[in-house]
Amino acid sequence: MFNSFVIPWLSLSVLIPLVAAFFVGKLNDLPRARRASVAALAMSLVTTLIANFAVARHPEAKFTEALWQCFAIDALNAIPLTLFAALCLGVAILAPKHNLTPSWLAGVLWLCATTTAAYAANHLIVFALAWAGSLAPFLVMRFFASANNERTIPAFAQRVLWLSLICLCIGAGLLIYAAPDWSLAFVRTGESSLLFTAFGFLMAAVILRKGLFPAHSWVVTAFEHGPLLPLVLLVNDHLGAFLVARIVLPLLPDVAHSAWPFFSALSLFTAVYAAVLALAERQPRRVFALVAISQSAFVLTGLESNTAVGIAGALVLWQVVSVATTMMAAVYAGLEARLGAAFQADKFMGLALNAPRLAVFFAVGCLALVGLPLTLGFPAEDLLLQGTLATNPYLGVILPIVTAMNAFSAVRLFARIFLGKPVAAAHDLADALPRERWALTTAFLFLVLGGLFPSALIKLPAIAAERLAGKAAHVVQSLRLP
């Protein structure tokens, strides 16, 4: 009964933005293209909310498509599906006209459709195709290259993303070859060389796409020279972390257990290294990228903890990083569009005098990202710390220090943009427009109310975490048996 209720809405959440992307891309009227994009993304958001309703009522269940079984929704992907649709809707509303074209909006719609398909995928091949589709706007279709004065993604970043796609396809192909089953429910047990190779390629795809050391430089370069808001959506889909949670941990439990210490250490090193680089960096876009890399690296650390509390903390931190960084990027992009060449955030600009609302939104995004109490970032980092201390005691020292360094970098960025004596160009600066106020206020309430009443946003991640941790505990027990 619930399958027949959920799946049509789940399929529509992919089809609506996908069809709208082709329609919007052919329009010549920008206001009409924005209205059509916002309407399509709003409908996609509503469909994911309806699908979430069934999961909220039966959180222990997994609802799959009745015919082809290509899509499924459960406690793990229910919130990411809705959250990413909301982020895409927010970006379509907040995007400055200065950088906007119908092709740009079509790219956001395409990102929403393909990323939603990746989250909902119930087959390895469907996931691989959706992964490739989410990279297509930056590699093949070049939706964002035609925007007015908008920068294109650098060639170096494109090569890294191509390599991540190749690694994913090889890893998925090896899994299918090892056991010819395309579904994401067939566990590949044992520690054969073939499974180790598949695991290696899949984790290489995670490292490259997520920007773990030494692949962090593509994210920094892309943020410095590329289209900021689309890149924030690409990074905030966290498909690398989702690949670990949906495919690597459930399908390769034996191999993953033996290799997790290395990848956990790599995630922690990335968090520390990016935080140190951010302290020495002066270019604002690069600072923003490094802080985002550092904080999001803790998501993988939590997933690799093998404890329910740590995994739950990672899944909640996923929500915080996604909303906070998108909020900050939207404010930053809006100020860049307003001031043009006069926007030089490497010095104090004093923009808070003329744009106090934008200053507050940017400050809340910064502080929530680094775990300020009374925001959702605080329970996320608290869960992460409690859950990982047993398996990785070094995190008890590293997490507070790295978070403090990232807080310093984020507050310094805020100070350079909004504090000090106003520059000459700031005198005619417009504060948040009505469309910006509504979208940014929604993100603000999500972070603040989520911190005050976190149980609603922790319930489903906690159930998903218990499943993943239970599988990990079963593997550990089996390895200890004589």
Image: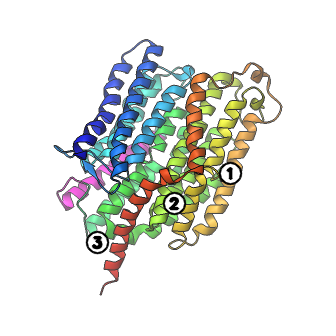
Question: Seen from this angle, which residue lies furthest right?
Answer: 421
| SS for callout 3 | loop
**Picture quadrant of residue 354:** top right
Question: Residue 87 appears at what percent x and percent y?
Answer: 48, 36
Q: Quadrant of the N terminus?
A: top left
Q: Earlier in the sequence, mark 1 or mark 2?
A: 2
Please state the extent of the stretch shown in magenta in the rendering.
157-183
Identify which residue is drawn at 39% across, 58% down: 464
Q: Amino acid at mark 3?
A: Glu
Give residue 325's quadrant in the image: top right
Q: Measuring from the top left, give residue 15's x and y in whole percent.
A: 29, 31
Amino acid at the residue labelled 2: Ser
Chief secondary structure of the magenta portion: helix
**Residues at marks 3 and 1, CA–CA distance in whole angstroms:** 42 Å
424 on left or right of 265: right
Residue position for label 1: 407
